[in-house]
Image (cartoon, rainbow, N blue to C red):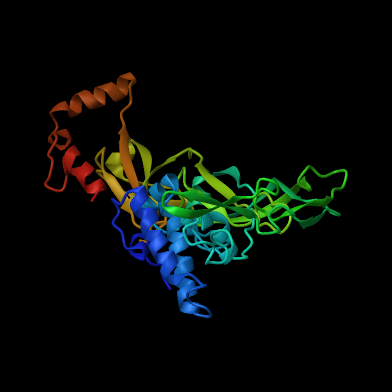
Amino acid sequence: MAKRDYYEILGISKGASAAEIKKAYRKKAIAFHPDKNPDDKTAEAKFKEAAEAYEVLSDSDKKARYDQFGHQAFEGGGGGFNGGGMNMDDIFSQFGDIFGGGFGGGFSGFGGGGGGQRRSKGSNLRIRVKLTLEEVANGVEKKIKVKRKVQAAGTTYKTCTTCNGAGQVTRIANTILGRMQTAAPCNVCAGSGQIINNRPNDADAQGLKVAEETVSIKIPAGVVDGMQLKVSGKGNEAPGNGISGDLLVAIEELEHENLQREGDNLHYDLYVSYPEAVLGTSKEIDTVTGKVRIKVEAGMQSGKILRLRGKGIPSINGYGTGDLLVHVNVWTPKTLNKKQKEFFEEMLEDEHFSPKPESSDKSFFEKVKDMFS
């Protein structure tokens, strides 16, 4: 089932401000919060859906990528990539403070006194993956060695005595508006609700150590240079019962020797000799799926564009596949021997060599227009 538009989920327009986005999410989260809708799977699904939309639209970089590429900017066609895929712990950990203390701890996981425990999240890791044009066109699975923090064997934790495992502490202050309750992450356990009890020699102060892991990354066809994908849970682990961060994968497209990319279309410069253009020939050219042979008709004009449909890059949004545009360039010799020169001098007045453009021989501007149509 296709995902709903994030703006539609929150009931806002694309031009909504950060404050409007936050307000819309808060309204949806209150309406569908699990504590208000116990054992209601539909409400829980909508609660997660709203949190996923807010995760993207509240981040300026993610919002820009979503506006340009839609859900595919984060999903990447499966294999661990997703724009949200959030569980309840993710939501409570990341967005619990959006409600402040105004609810007096009435919702578990949000606010301060509801008994819900906040779970800390490990930091994200970022890597850059270089792809050839062929890998971009066909999709590829990459196995990358990643150094990430993991819990060291033998590390044990105990409940934080400052927050009693809640991960946050509440404070009550008397104001002109009455008694106000606020909640903040516990500064002793950093919001995890646990403190280290036993630390092995190879672990840091949080009970973590650096380990190298081979991560399999499935990259879908059609990705764009600069696009960022996400592998959930493959960032640094968090101490105690926290959840792992994510691995963010930035795509870098390597330059191809003969092909140039323009959106989903590819361009290829084909050079033919003057005799080949006059007599006709066949040429082998590169494509992203291997070499193909194309026919150059007799009398081919320089500047002619041959379109090979479906030989370009698949659309990341699933809108089909681009074309390969072959630009024919007739190579004019710069030097001639005496015999060759005499031949062409004789042809100066020959009617066969006089330019006679036909209606099918489009102008340069018409060809450019056709390229982008």
> Which residue occupies 73% across, 51% down?
213
Pinpoint residue 294: horizontal percent, then vertical percent: 38, 51
Is the residue 341 above or below the residue 263 in the image?
above
Marks counted in the figure total 0
Please provide percent x and percent y for residue 146. 69, 46
Of the pair 200 and 117, the residue shown nearer to us = 117
Q: Residue furthest bottom?
A: 39
> Along the line of sight, which residue is nearer the eye, 137 or 88?
88
- Whether residue 323 appears in this view of the structure is no
- Rendered residue at 33%/53% (across/down): 20
Residue 91 point in image, percent of width and height: 54, 61
Q: Quadrant of the N terminus?
A: bottom left
Frontmost residue, 210 versus 356: 210
Q: Nearer the viewer, residue 298 or 209?
A: 209
Q: Which quadrant holds residue 309?
A: bottom left
- Residue 319 placed where, x, y %? 35, 61
Is 311 on the left-hand or right-hand side of 302?
right
Q: Is residue 240 visible?
A: yes
Left or right relative to 96: residue 332: left
